[in-house]
Image (spheres, helix red, strand yellow):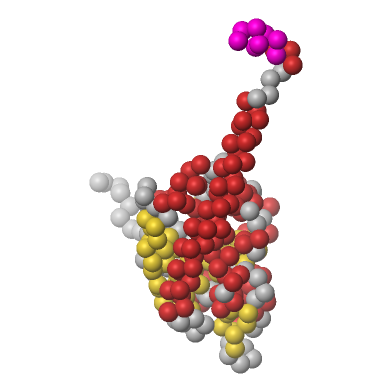
Amino acid sequence: MAGLNRKGIWRSLSPARKFINEMMYFAQQVPLIPVARTMHLAEVVAGRGRSHPRPSWTAVFMKAYGLVCQREPLLRQAYIRWPWPHLYEHPYSVCGIPVEREFQGERIVLAAQIREPERQTLDQLEGHLERYKTTPIDNIGYFRMALRVGRMPKLLRRFLWWSTLDISGFKRAKRLGTFTISSYGQLGAEQLRPISPLTTLLTFGPISATGEVVVKIIYDHRVLDGANVARFLAELEQTLGSEILSELGSMASSAHAQQAGLAGTRPEGLGGNAQAAA
């Protein structure tokens, strides 16, 4: 024990941590209420297992929730404070997605956006997610912006966040999204009450082999009421079992047809030998 430094260490906040801290500062000002529903997605689990390439559950839930938002304009609304309190409705959904990356020796969380997830295939959504996970951070505009804001003085950071959230609904949706999706289900954990400055945050826990999963929507009570959110969760489960299940089936059929085509194709020079062997 001799010579052991028994004092703590001061560490400066990184730009990424400052960005998240400002997000949490403004999220704490939103009256957020969670609503949960236990969903039974055995058919979706089986359909995803047969599909190739297999989409992540984040992509699956993102598209399903995007389809619900497309049908339910309330989910595309946001509470705007200035010049007087009012609701702004965006014409389409924008998913804000947190992405964990390694940067300068630190695990950080950066935010990206995916526009109109309901109009994209699951394969396309998975491509976006993979790009945000693997492309160098400096090559992603959303990531560069977050780090640039994190390097600004505190008063300027606060002003930028305030102006984004409370002045222009269009810029709010463009810069941050209309909803957030975040899950630790793949890590075997469930978020109890996450917060976000956006109108809704969708989260889900671990999905059992039988397809049972707890799905939550954390919503801004200035925009939505709990009964509607409960109905949206029921609609989300129906969407997963209909449109999403159908797309997973199409992916499985395409993969099977492709494999069958490859199996039936032989180099011309081997055709005679194959027949002779038969």
Tell which residue pokes out farthest to the right in this image: 268
Residue 196 vs residue 157, the one in the foreground: 196
Residue at 60 percent across and 10 percent down: it is 278
- Residue 242 on the magenta segment: no
Residue at 54% of width from left, 64% of height from top?
65
As rendered, which of 275 and 187 lies closer to the eye?
275
Q: Is residue 119 visible?
A: yes
Q: Is residue 44 above or below residue 98?
A: above
Instruction: Give percent across and percent down for residue 240.
Output: 50, 59
The x, y position of residue 170, in whole percent, is: 67, 77
Q: Residue at x 65, y 7 (%)?
A: 276
Q: Position of residue 102 (x, y in %)?
A: 53, 50
Outermost bottom residue: 84
State left or right for residue 119 relative to residue 102. Answer: right
Q: Is residue 275 magenta?
A: yes
Instruction: Name the residue at 39% across, 57% down.
Output: 40
- In the displayed image of the protein, which residue is found farthest to the left? 1
Which residue is more in the foreground, 214 or 83?
Answer: 214
Task: Pinpoint residue 70: horizontal percent, then vertical percent.
Answer: 61, 70
Snapshot quadrant of residue 87: bottom right
> Majority secondary structure of the magenta segment?
helix
The residue range painted magenta reads 271-278
Say left or right for 128 vs 227.
right
Q: In terms of image quadrants, where is residue 230?
A: bottom left
Q: Quadrant of residue 51?
A: top right
